[in-house]
Image (cartoon, rainbow, N blue to C red):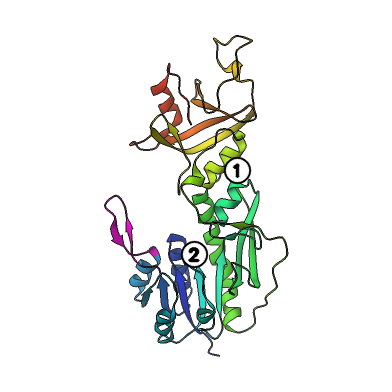
């Protein structure tokens, strides 16, 4: 084994690109990069290289653009003399033929404390579930879904009101630290691996449908979902025929809804789920279990994000209900 074996790096999005930059800056020799094929981006759907492919091009690293590591991609990888693979959010499972293509195997950075939240959206799953702790796992890939032996982990607390974009940025840096610490041991054949514990939980790919707000849920569950699905795919609701994104909100807990209105009578029926009460500081939405959600930032259809207090002033005097 050479002192600094060449690395094949597979990844696609921005957090993977940041990790690739750190590997190169750390003096590791990346012989080839595998990233998903160019994809349409923006309103004009312009075919655009992935963030990882762009970073590889900047460093002059050969790039294989493939949506899966098939026999053709394996043949291309073999040309670059790599013995170890690093995977960060590549976006496809590796079959046995790909796993066997590198003599020292493939190692994956996963943004949860495995075996919790195996799957495609661990950051969002942790936030949606209201977890208070998460972390990063470095593990050896096998043919299962995030089931391989653990090389190392880093734990972190989830900050109050942290959304998925903010948490992923922190986990990316923690993952880089873990990878730079463990990779020399992997290269030297000195890394230790432990099997994953029992009691795995799973999460799937994100869809826009799962990010729709269900106002029958307690406000704390809704806040967790809003944090989980921002910035992508974006938590949303409808107001009449229009769709509205809710970018930030705070759960206030159980409240006497009728007391919010100065004109309310003692025998007034509770407000409908999703109805909005305007206050001096902004807008409150009536949620399940007699709870309230304070809107902080929203994006009405066709407009830029705005403070909820600005939006509230524009609808003052109107009866408004999200569905």
Residue 241 is a magenta residue = no
Left or right of 159, for residue 4: left
Circle number at residue 160: 1
The quadrant of the image that shows the N terminus is bottom right
Question: Is 12 drawn above or below residue 45 in the view shown?
Answer: below
Q: Residues within 10 Å of mark 2 (few under 14, many from 20)?
A: many
Give the SS element for disc 1: loop
Instruction: Estimate the spatial distance between the alpha carbons at disc 2 and disc 1, rounded to whole Å.
Output: 26 Å
Single out the mark in the foreground, 2 or 1. 2
**Residue in the image at 51% along x and 70% along y:** 93
Label located before the other in sequence (2 or 1)? 2
Q: Which residues are magenta?
A: 36-51
Circle number at residue 35: none
Image quarter of residue 160: top right
**Residue in the image at 40% along x and 81% along y:** 72
Question: Is 135 drawn above or below residue 107 in the view shown?
Answer: above
- Please say whether residue 287 is visible from this viewpoint: yes
Q: Which residue is mark 2?
A: 89
The one of 206 and 304 positioned closer to us in this rendering: 206
**Residue in the image at 61% along x and 65% along y:** 137
Q: Residues within 10 Å of mark 1 (few under 14, many from 20)?
A: few
Question: Is 316 drawn above or below residue 299 in the view shown?
Answer: above
Residue at the extreme bottom:
1
- Could you tell me residue 235's position as x and y percent? 48, 42
- Could you tell me residue 270's position as x and y percent? 60, 19
Give the SS element for disc 2: loop
Say whether marks 2 and 1 touch (CB < 8 Å): no
- Could you tell me residue 264's position as x and y percent? 57, 11
């Amino acid at each position: 084994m050479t002192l600094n074996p060449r690395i094949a790096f597979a990844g696609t999005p921005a957090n993977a690109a940041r990790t690739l930059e750190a590997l190169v800056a750390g003096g590791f020799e990346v012989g080839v990069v595998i990233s998903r094929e160019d994809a349409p981006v923006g309103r004009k759907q312009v075919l655009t290289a992935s963030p990882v492919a762009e970073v590889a091009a900047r460093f002059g690293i050969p790039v294989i653009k493939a949506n899966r590591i098939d026999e053709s991609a394996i043949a291309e990888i073999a040309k670059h003399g790599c013995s170890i693979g690093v995977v960060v959010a590549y976006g496809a499972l590796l079959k046995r033929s790909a796993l066997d293509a590198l003599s020292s195997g493939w190692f994956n950075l996963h943004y949860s404390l495995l075996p919790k939240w195996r799957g495609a959206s661990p950051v969002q799953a942790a936030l949606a579930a209201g977890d208070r702790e998460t972390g990063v796992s470095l593990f050896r890939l096998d043919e299962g879904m995030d089931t391989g032996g653990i090389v190392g982990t880093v734990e972190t607390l989830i900050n109050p009101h942290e959304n998925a974009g903010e948490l992923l940025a922190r986990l990316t840096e923690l993952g880089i630290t873990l990878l730079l610490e463990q990779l020399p041991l992997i290269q030297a054949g000195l890394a230790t691996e432990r099997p994953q514990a029992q009691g795995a939980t799973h999460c799937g790919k994100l869809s826009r449908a799962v990010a729709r707000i269900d106002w029958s849920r307690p406000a704390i569950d809704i806040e967790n979902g809003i944090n989980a699905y921002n910035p992508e795919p974006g938590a949303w609701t409808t107001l009449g025929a229009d769709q509205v994104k809710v970018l930030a909100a705070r759960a206030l807990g159980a409240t006497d809804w009728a007391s919010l209105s100065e004109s309310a009578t003692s025998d007034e029926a509770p407000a409908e789920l999703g109805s909005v009460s305007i206050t001096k500081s902004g807008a409150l939405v009536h949620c399940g279990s007699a709870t309230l959600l304070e809107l902080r930032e929203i994006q009405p259809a066709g407009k830029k994000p705005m403070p909820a207090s600005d939006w509230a002033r524009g609808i003052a005097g109107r009866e408004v209900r999200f569905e």
